[in-house]
Image (cartoon, rainbow, N blue to C red):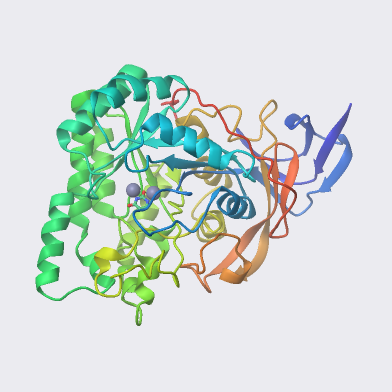
Amino acid sequence: MTHDTVITGARVVTASGTTHCDIGITDGRIAALGKDLQGEHVIDGHGLIALPGGIDSHVHISQPSGPGIEMADDFTSGTRSAACGGNTTVLPFCLPEEGRTLREAVADYRAKADGNCMTDVSFHLIVKDTDPVTLGQDLPALIQAGYTSFKVFMTYAGLALSDRQILEVMAVAKEQGAMVMVHAENEDAIEFLRDRADRNGETAPYHHATTRPVPVEREATHRAISLAEIAGVPLTIVHVSNGEATEEIVRARQRGLTVFAETCPQYITLTASDLDRDGFDGAKYVCSPPPRTAEEWPKIWAGIEQGTFDLFSSDHCPFRFNDPAGKDAPGARQSFRNIPNGIPGVETRLPILFSEGVVKGRLSLERFAAITATNHARLYGLFPRKGAIMVGADADIALWDPTLSKPIRQADLHHGSDYTPWEGFEVTGWPVRTILRGQTVMQNGDPVGAPSGSYLEREAPDLLL
Ligand code: DUC
Ligand code: ZN
Ligand code: ZN
């Protein structure tokens, strides 16, 4: 049989282990794994590693961000950046604009994404309203239509839900079989600390970090887990930043609860001191939870190595730095309260983890594949179509050169933001080709071809990671 495309000679990280073989691709799917496969097109994979295309299940694209504030990426630039970073699927969050329903928000997002994506996409929901129509009609209907995961916030005015509201939302998740993702930070505690900081004149970007200390996150993590236990649902704690919150997750699992956890590159590479950089530069690092101290990094690494973290995502939430619609928002230089929260990272997530994890000997290739692709596909209902190199799956593959060394440079990236928090960060191991359903969408760091990404319908979460 002659395949449409054959990738020859790569070291292939399959769903069950690592081997040297050819990959035969026909009609956008992986048709064969074997020796001496024949193809109309041949991609020479010798010296390269074939990994499942990255799935970044935590990104923000074109998300409404308040009056006058604009996210730096739309679906065109966000998914272009994702593809250039070795990803083939991203899962952004769908947040209703003020006054719009969740159903309308989904329709708005679908219209924004359609025809513009260089990776496949699927949306999580954000539940910020708990009125009877949202919880009784819209949310159940959307879950049944394949939007099988949603996020709730314990912080941010206008988004934060009370404990009672979280329980009501969890009850819908239980009934419908959806996954609840929680942003765990205690809003009241943050407001108390911010008011005190205001009185003390502590208004610089650094105080974004001092007013969201570790106990704010640890307490909310514990409470979110307890609420899920009371409601009888599994949950995912997203963007875990520190050791104490990690311990809460470990303890919950020891009690037999089904708790999944995600961490991000910023929590193994950045610190709160980055928010204290000269002038207004600290604003480039304002995200929530904030980067901690370097003492937390080994605790997060231990969680990655020991399996506490199932997911390694970017939490890509890009704003431009030199822009009044971005980090330099009105009042931002007067108070960190006015700095939009979030950092760009969808293109650098995989290289940072590969370099710091695989190349430095902390992570096997199999575990890298699991926490950057396979587990995302399983947990969010995309497996077995996505997330693994195996016969029958979509031919979503990233080819990596494990020896290529170069620093991260804004000039080389493809997001809409005008900076990267990792400027100058040395990386060994880069994706050199990204293949989406058999078609090359990135080669040697540059995007290739017209947007060909599609919207992915999802199944229920697979809780047996
Ligand atoms: N939470 C996120 O998940 N992303 C960006 C900002 C935030 O608070
Ligand atoms: Zn969040
Ligand atoms: Zn996020």
Residue 102 visible in the current orientation: yes
Name the quadrant containing residue 271: bottom left
Camera-nearest residue between 115 and 374: 115
Camera-nearest residue between 54 and 403: 54
Quadrant holding the N terminus: top right
- Identified at 20% across, 29% down, the residue is 167
How many discs appear?
0
Residue 409 visible in the current orientation: no
x and y percentages locating residue 430 in the rendered image: 64, 59
x and y percentages locating residue 117 in the rendered image: 62, 44
Which residue ends up furthest to the top in the rendered image? Answer: 175
- Identified at 24% across, 46% down, the residue is 158
Quadrant holding the C terminus: top left
Q: Viewed as shown, does residue 128 lie left or right of 97?
A: left
- Identified at 50% across, 69% down, the residue is 419
Q: Viewed as shown, does residue 55 lie left or right of 301?
A: right
Camera-nearest residue between 319 and 22: 319
Q: Viewed as shown, does residue 432 lie left or right of 340?
A: right
Give above or below for 159 relative to 428: above
Give above or below for 14 relative to 56: above
x and y percentages locating residue 373 in the rendered image: 54, 40
- Identified at 72% across, 52% down, the residue is 48
Name the quadrant containing residue 53: top right
x and y percentages locating residue 20 in the rendered image: 74, 42
